[in-house]
Image (tube, grey):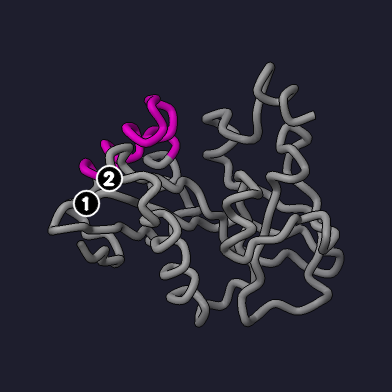
């Protein structure tokens, strides 16, 4: 069955929250998404995947900042990426991300950053942040998991430290802690 990718509709917020919770198996990520929605980081760049008229996946991009040497540059943060467990490993997340990247190519932001599995995201064009001298917003983000992709407005002088929106810090959703972090090191 064909997957349709589009911007979320206002009446889909509760369904999206359920999808995010089911995908992550916890209550914290839906709360993070709501905190982002309620913050100045929210840009309305929230995409859904529909299969047979049913919402099965979601991704959102929020505002972040690159603390570059000469000026602060607004960038995008990709988080969270969610697909219902019953629809995972069918290419829906990949399709969501690639379609959204195409749709975002005309925006003013020059870069998109994320924390994630490099084995997955590297297949979608994301590169290690270290390759372009980008600095992680926290030492709890494993170096290989800190990744970026360039958009058409990128210029080579754009380097520096990524600054996350407050919601990530307030919800303690930056990087890993404890044993999960030790496994990366």
Which residue is pictured at 27% across the width and 45% down the height? 16
Q: Where residue 53 sits: x, y (%)?
A: 13, 58
Percent of width and height locating residue 178: 68, 17
Query: Which residue matches tag 2?
Result: 16
Query: Total label count?
Result: 2
> In the shown orientation, is residue 10 left or right of residue 68?
left
Q: Position of residue 117 (x, y in %)?
A: 61, 44
Please identify, in this view, whether the residue under mark 1 or under mark 2 is nearer the observer.
Answer: 1
Compared with 84, 134 (above or below) is below
Quadrant in the picture for the N terminus: bottom left
What residue is shown at x 75% (from left), y 22% (from top)?
Answer: 182
Q: At numbered mark 1, what does the secondary structure look like: helix, strand or loop?
A: strand
Type of secondary structure dominating the magenta stretch: helix
Label 1 vs label 2: CA separation? Answer: 8 Å
Mark number for residue 165? none
Can residue 14 be seen here?
A: yes
Q: Position of residue 72 (x, y in %)?
A: 73, 64
Residue bearing the label numbered 1: 55
Dot 1 alpha-carbon crowd within 10 angstroms: few under 14, some 14 to 19, many 20 or more: many
The quadrant in which the C terminus is found is top right
Q: Can see residue 74?
A: no
Highlighted magenta segment, given as a residue range:
14-32
């Amino acid at each position: 069955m064909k997957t349709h990718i589009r911007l979320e509709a206002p009446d889909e917020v509760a369904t999206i929250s359920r999808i995010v919770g089911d995908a992550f198996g916890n209550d914290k990520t839906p709360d993070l998404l709501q905190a982002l929605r309620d913050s100045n980081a929210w840009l309305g760049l929230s995409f859904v995947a529909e299969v047979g008229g049913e919402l099965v996946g979601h991704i959102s991009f929020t505002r972040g900042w690159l603390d570059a040497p000469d000026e602060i540059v607004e960038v995008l943060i990709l988080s969270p990426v969610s697909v219902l467990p019953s629809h995972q490993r069918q290419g829906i997340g990949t399709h969501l991300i690639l379609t959204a990247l195409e749709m975002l190519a005309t925006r003013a932001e020059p870069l998109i950053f994320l924390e994630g599995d490099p084995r997955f995201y590297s297949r979608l064009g994301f590169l290690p942040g270290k390759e372009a001298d980008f600095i992680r917003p926290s030492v709890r983000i494993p170096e290989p998991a800190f990744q970026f992709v360039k958009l058409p407005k990128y210029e080579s002088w754009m380097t520096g430290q990524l600054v996350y929106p407050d919601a990530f810090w307030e919800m303690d959703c930056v990087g890993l802690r404890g044993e999960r972090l030790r496994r990366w090191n």
